Structures are given as structure tokens and as C-alpha cells.
Image (cartoon, rainbow, N blue to C red):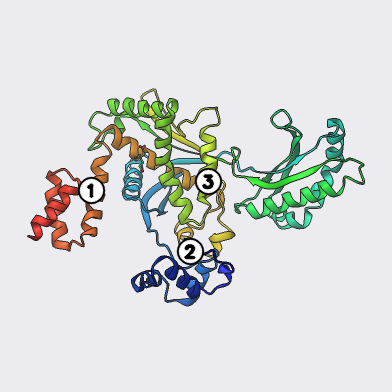
Amino acid sequence: MHKTISGFSKLTKIEKVDWILKTYFNDDDSSRNLVMQYWNSDQKLQKLHDEFIENTITNFYLPLGVAPNFLINKTLYTIPMTIEESSVVAAASKAAKFWFERGGFKAEVISTTKIGQVHFSFSGNKDELHNYFNAIKPKLISDAASITKNMERRGGGILDIELRDKTEELDNYYQLHATFETLDAMGANFINSCLEQFADTFKNETETHKINGISIVMSILSNYVPQCLVKAEVRCKIEELKDKDILNPEEFAEKFKQAVSIAEVEPHRAVTHNKGIMNGVDAVVLATGNDFRAVEAGVHAYASKDGKYSSLTHCSIDDNEFCFWLEIPLALGTVGGLTSLHPLVKFALQMLGKPSAKDLMKIVAVAGLAQNFAALKSLTTTGIQQGHMKMHLMNILNQFEANETEKKQLIDHFKKNTVTHSAVVEAIEKLRA
Ligand code: MEV
């Protein structure tokens, strides 16, 4: 085992790489070349990326793909997607085309309220605490004026602060539960700054109001945002579902609905079902410079809101009409943070027509719905492996550095034969022999 290192963050980038190479790679030159191969020759651009985080040693590429033909509320979008998983962009594009021909997607933002909490403990008299809170509430808000000024000028700010008694769940536990409107900003910094100011005021005024025993534990936004909700849907007459893979639309609609119902009642299936939705959601969230971990955590909490993990999409068949929809919480930003720093994020946002946060919520929800539609359509008709194996074939061919002629011959061969890793390797070897 090597010794710990202190002062690592103070080393230059080269020194950090040297230490890694010496410690883990026997000073191997090919590893050094690998790390440095990913450095951008544009030093200004590289510095920008280096400074996003700490201890950067190189860049880690993910593909940025696009899925065209998304008709959302009568506007046509090409959706940028950052994702490493093959088939996701292809599936999104297919679903976009399918629904383009059937009137497109509809999406609406239901609400945009975000939440933050000051968690504190208090062992004294509850009435005294309530009186204190009511007396201090206007000051909690006015003391945060310098933080909220700009946001308020644009129409956002603090919506409300409530005192919540959580002592039934945990001894002496209370919260200041605050709600915010952060407009086009994701709002994490704004909310956290407000909360820390609330906490200061809440603590500092205790002497004047003669109340003892308030101890602030922490102040932080919540990534669970069930009041920052967006809905996306598609609908059409059952017979309009017909296409090359859907020869019997009635049977397809019933089976599709049943697949959704299974995910509604069965958590094992629901997790995979929702994972497919997040393939679309995360890819757009990442491409547009938003925090996919926050989105993931919030969305999955929402999937369990009724006490059991369940499907985020739903399906109905009424009066010969097929309807399929998704409702998810999404706290997104289109200004500030990475959105104004990362050149490719700016590019992605421009491609989407510089959307407001509300527009982006709709686009992301549609990407999730499209992905789920594509997955369920494959699963309930041809099976998922047909598409996956096609991409898998390409990956194996690339691994073996197949040239264009070899690729063409092998793709033709596997139109009639089942793709497995060993079958592809065998076919390459045979071709090359
Ligand atoms: C794979 O990334 C996603 C799927 O498993 C989703 C699903 O099963 O619905 C295909």
C-alpha cells in the first residue's frame, strides 16, 4: 500500500499526473500518453474544463448525440443527448418520428415551486416556538433582501416559510420549510444562501425574543420537488398506432397498457421501466448542463410518493383513444451554473432555441416519455434485443477495428444470423482468414 499524500490539491496538473503514474502505473509512458491524449490543445478551453472541479487530470468524453423530429406543442425540436448507452438516441429518434406522424407530443408545466429547509432542534415549549416564529417571520424574509433583490425584480423569490413540527418523527426536531420560485435558474445557490440567512436570523434573534434552546443543525435545499412538476403526453386513435411493427393496433394498445400496469404494481419492473425513462431524461439534463444526480434523486422519490415504488408513466384506452403520459418533478435551470460556462451546453441550449426553464422541463419530460414509449414498443413487439444487438454488433466490430468493407459484409451476414459476442468474433476471424 502506498503512503497517503498531503497537499495533493496544491500540485500542478502535471505533478498530479506524475504522482498517479508513479503510484499506480509504474511510471508507464503509455498511461501518461493516454491521459494527455485527452487534453485539449486549446489551452483556454482546457483551463475552463480543468476549473469545473478540483484535481482535474484530464477530460472524460461522453458522446453528444441528437434526436431530431421532436414535435412538442407544435414546435419542432432536435434534442441534444449526452449518453454512453447505445440504442438510446436511436430509440428517441424513432419515437419522435412515430409521434410526429401522429400529432406530436403535448407537454405542460404544472408547477415550479422549489423547496429548502433549515433543520433545527428545540426542546422547549412548543407554543413559545410558534410565537417566536410568527414574530420573526417578516424579519427572516427582510434580512434576506440583499440575496432576493435580483430574483424578485425578475418575478421570483421566497414564496413562504412555514414552521414544521417533526417531533413525532424525531425528538426535538423542527424545520423552517421554505418555498421558492427561481424562474430560469435551477436556484441551488440562491436557495441555500437564503436558507443560511434564515438560520442566522432565526438564531440571532433568540436573545431579543427571550427564547432558549434553538440549535440549528443544517440549512439545505431539498432535491425532492413534487411541486416542480411537468407532464408530457401522447395520444391518438387506436387504429392510428399501426406501423411496420404494429400490425394489430388493438392488440398492441392492450399489451402496451398492460406493460405499463405491470410497472405500476410491481417495483422490480418499475425500476427498470423508470430506468428507461431516465435514459432520456438524464441524457438531456446532462447535455443542457443540469444536475442529473439531483434530478435522479427527486424523480425516484416521486416514484415512491404513494408508499411503494411505481411507474412514472401511465396509459389509458378510452373511447378508442390511446393515451400515454409521464408526470415527473424536474428542477432545471437554463441560466447560471454550467449553462453559461460549458461551450457545448451553450450549443445544446441554442439548438433548443434558448429555452426557458419551463420549456426545458417540457423537452426533458418528452425525452423521457419518448424513451419509455420506444422501450415498451420494442419489448411488447419485437423484443429489445433486436435493436440492442445491432448496436452491440457495431461495438464489437469497432473493438476489432473492422474496416468499412468488413463492417458492410458482417452487418449483412448478421441480418440473417443471431448476434452474440462469440458469433461476431468467429465471423470476423473467418472473414480475415
Ligand atoms: C435499458 O437501458 C432500458 C430498458 O431496460 C427499459 C425498459 O425495460 O423499459 C430497455
Camera-side residue: 168 or 376? 168
Marks 2 and 1, how far apart at CA: 44 Å
Tell me: residue 402, above or below residue 319: below
Camera-side residue: 217 or 41? 217
Q: Earlier in the sequence, mark 2 or mark 3?
A: 2
Camera-side residue: 127 or 24? 24
Quadrant of the rendered image containing residue 381: top left
Q: Amino acid at mark 3?
A: Val
Total numbered circles: 3
Residue 2 numbered mark, or none: 2
Q: Earlier in the sequence, mark 3 or mark 1?
A: 3
Which residue is identified by label 1?
Answer: 390
Tell me: residue 107, above or below residue 11: above
Which residue is identified by label 3?
Answer: 295
> Is 167 displayed left or right of 24 in the figure?
right
Q: Amino acid at mark 2?
A: His
Can residue 234 be seen in this snapshot? no
Camera-side residue: 350 or 61? 61
Quadrant of the rendered image containing residue 428: bottom left
The quarter of the image that holds ligand 1 is top left
Q: Residue at x 54, y 35 (%)?
A: 302
Q: Amino acid at mark 1?
A: Lys
Q: Residue at x 55, y 31 (%)?
A: 305
